[in-house]
Amino acid sequence: MSASWWDADDDEDDEFFDESDIRVRPNPKANRPRTKIRPAHSDAIIGRILGVDRGRYRVLIDEDLETEHEITAARARELRRTPIVTGDRAKIVGDTSGDEGTLGRIVGIEDRSSLLRRSADDTDNVERVIVANADQMLVVVAAADPPPRPRLVDRYLVAALDAGIRPLLVVTKTDLADPAEFLSHFEGIDDLRVFRSAQDAWPVDEIGAALEGHSTVFVGHSGVGKSTLVNALVPDAKRATGHVNQVTGRGRHTSSSTVSLRYRSATGSGWVIDTPGVRSFGLGHVDPENILRAFADLAEAAENCPRGCTHLPDAPDCALDEADVAPARLASLRGLLETFASREEH
């Protein structure tokens, strides 16, 4: 080369630079550089989330009736935006002994088979996750005190079928009122299994048989006796029970959090997932096309509707207008469809 960016003849006194001349800015926090590469956690074990309290999760490890034990765990930082709910199957690392003062760490969530959700109201698209991996929903409703609400039950059924969960129905306090009129609202649902109970006469064995081998989420209006039923099925559950306000007719919230409880019998076991009582159940997250699925009898009649029929009261030639169905049931369906139609308009 005839020329160079540096010519030694121009300044023979210059010294060559080496690594010692490089000044490295110190790390004031003295921690390691951050990396996006996360560990594989190949040694993680799988546990079932039983409940959560102030950022600490109760987790069942080694899910076997003989060797299972509970531990306390916290979520890893990378999962801070991931909802972790009762029923989840979580990957756990760290101390999983369950000894007092120990803490495991949740580093991942297994794929969910189902996800039951609700929203604050029908216009709210923000979903609230209730439980994961349930395959049954037991709807608890009272025959009286408080009076049954068919349209609330319809909402439960819509949410269950939207999540791919099989619904069951328990009517409590049948000693106070005959539930026949209420149950007639659901006569068109052939595969809806119904249980009846009276005060101090719970069909525990019959309901328990339906729980074996399943993960069943219990839902219901406050004051219908849901917590009392849970205590009858799981004697050591010790879920708080309340009463109905005689002035307002409303039940008092007693279950404040969602918990998963082991149901055991002489013939098998299952899971009871108790949820706080609610007075409303928003369906803002539900696909409107799935609403009709919860009204199987009406869906059959709707097959005779013209293509693109909305099934609303003003829909031309809607077959539901001439169908032999309960007027109250048709009104419930159309009420839900009207709510979703107005939501889409906005």
Image (cartoon, rainbow, N blue to C red):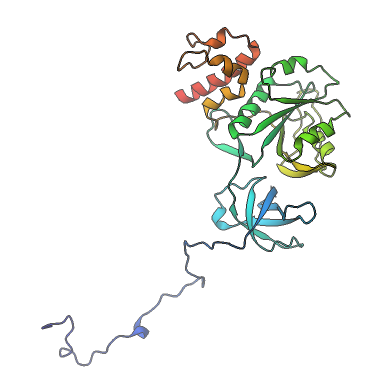
Q: Is residue 292 above or below residue 254?
A: above
- Give the quarter of the image for residue 279: top right
Circle count = 0
| Rendered residue at 75%/42% (across/down) | 270
Task: Kindly give the residue lying farthest to the right in the view shown.
Answer: 200
- Give the quarter of the image for residue 273: top right
Quadrant location of the N terminus?
A: bottom left
| Rendered residue at 58%/17% (across/down) | 300
Q: In the rendered image, is residue 53 in sight?
A: no
Q: Where residue 118 appears, x then y in whole percent?
A: 60, 34
Q: Where residue 304 appears, x then y in whole percent?
A: 52, 13
- Give the quarter of the image for residue 200: top right
178 relative position to 32: left or right? right
Q: Is residue 174 above or below residue 20?
A: above
| Rendered residue at 63%/11% (across/down) | 325
| Rendered residue at 76%/55% (across/down) | 68
Task: Kindly give the residue lying farthest to the left in the view shown.
Answer: 2
Q: Is residue 115 above or below residue 75?
A: above
Task: Kindly give the residue lying farthest to the top in the view shown.
Answer: 322
Q: In the rendered image, is residue 154 in sight?
A: yes
Quadrant location of the C terminus?
A: top left
Q: Where residue 63 appears, x then y in whole percent?
A: 73, 52
113 relative position to 203: left or right? left
Q: Is residue 322 above or below residue 274?
A: above
Camera-side residue of 39 and 55:
39
Q: Where residue 89 appears, x then y in whole percent?
A: 64, 49
Task: Kindly give the residue lying farthest to the front in the view shown.
Answer: 267
Camera-side residue of 232 and 296:
296
